[in-house]
Image (tube, rainbow, N blue to C red):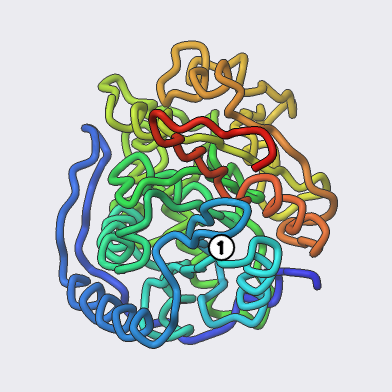
Amino acid sequence: MLLSSHDAFRGNVISVSTTILSCQRNPCQFHRSSMRSLTLLAALATNALSIALPWQSATDTASGIQLPLVIWHGLGDDFEREGLAEVSKLAESTNPGTYVHLIRLANDGSGDRSATFFGNVTEQIALVCEQLAADPILSTAPAVNALGFSQGGQFLRGYIERCNSPPVHNLVTFGSQHNGISAFESCAWDNWFCRGAEQLLRSGRWTSFAQSRVVPAQYFRDPEELGSYLEHSNFLADINNERAVKNETYKKNLASLNRFAMFMFEEDTVAVPKESALFSEVNVTSGEVTPLHERPIYKEDWLGLKQLDEQGKLDFNTAPGQHMHLSQKTLSKAFSQYFAPLEKEPRPSAPGLVVQPGF
């Protein structure tokens, strides 16, 4: 099996949201919007599914407690894709008893795919906070594991920082743009859906329109345009705690992770710079890479990354190949390492009883 998102740029554009939410100058405040109806529909569908299927909030297996897994896909993908169904099956076969929830931002694949290009990320994360909290399986589990593909990785991190209910135990991201992107991938000439978003990104990425409705613009970060980024960024500057006023809740929530594992694709030319997957910064002109450990975000611990690292809970990994070209071997290894059942706590023996020899 090979999971690839390169064929994902298809589908019809639909309107996701026209509500402008801003986190541009102060720590983000959540707002409820007209998307609440979508949350209700998703909750009703999830309730029906949970009644029909014999899953429990956290499966008690012979080897331990198996936590549910939440997956947020990347740009141009959608929850109905066959590749994501294969990933879900692999997660369950690697760790039997895993309940998998695929995050969705619409009731069908076309709408969900459109929402990866057009929408307000702040509003989308608020919707996901409601979606996960409304799921009867996820909401009653002691915690969940989380897997983010490409932009879904930084969005899951935003979920953890902003609400984290149900709480995330381990977060794993593949090819995510934790430190943003500084260039935009060129779209195929006949892909008008993608080309429309690309034109908006290139011509006016710091406009209020782009920062509230064009998804990739909301995690664009060019170190040579840092002033514009800090002033106008609707999403990334906020969840990276880069502005003068720091959000201590963001730091507290991210530092609560048991493990945060980041994977960078070694030959990635799609997400630029590829080193963003490991929170590194790259000088656009010279190409010089500044690793996370040498950056203020780590040294001053704006997000709790230093705290996680000092506790041995922050992992920097690489995966072979191009962006989102994932082999079954790579995924299986990650699932085994990061999503295995939690070890059961030993039951205390009854007081006053002594096991006698021969019994």
Viewed as shown, does residue 117 lie left or right of 318? left
User: In what quadrant of the picture does the N terminus appear?
Assistant: bottom right
Residue 262 % position (x, y): 64, 40
* Residue ID at (55%, 65%): 98
Q: Amino acid at mark 1?
A: Gly
Viewed as shown, does residue 157 lie left or right of 90? left
Residue in the foreground of this view, choosing between 56 and 89: 56
* Residue ID at (30%, 68%): 136
Residue 141 % position (x, y): 37, 56
Viewed as shown, does residue 116 lie left or right of 1? left
Viewed as shown, does residue 163 lie left or right of 312? left
State the residue position of label 1. 74
Residue in the foreground of this view, choosing between 294 and 91: 91
Residue 291 % position (x, y): 66, 22
Residue 228 appears in the rendering? no
* Residue ID at (59%, 47%): 172
Residue 299 % position (x, y): 51, 12
Disc 1, SS = loop
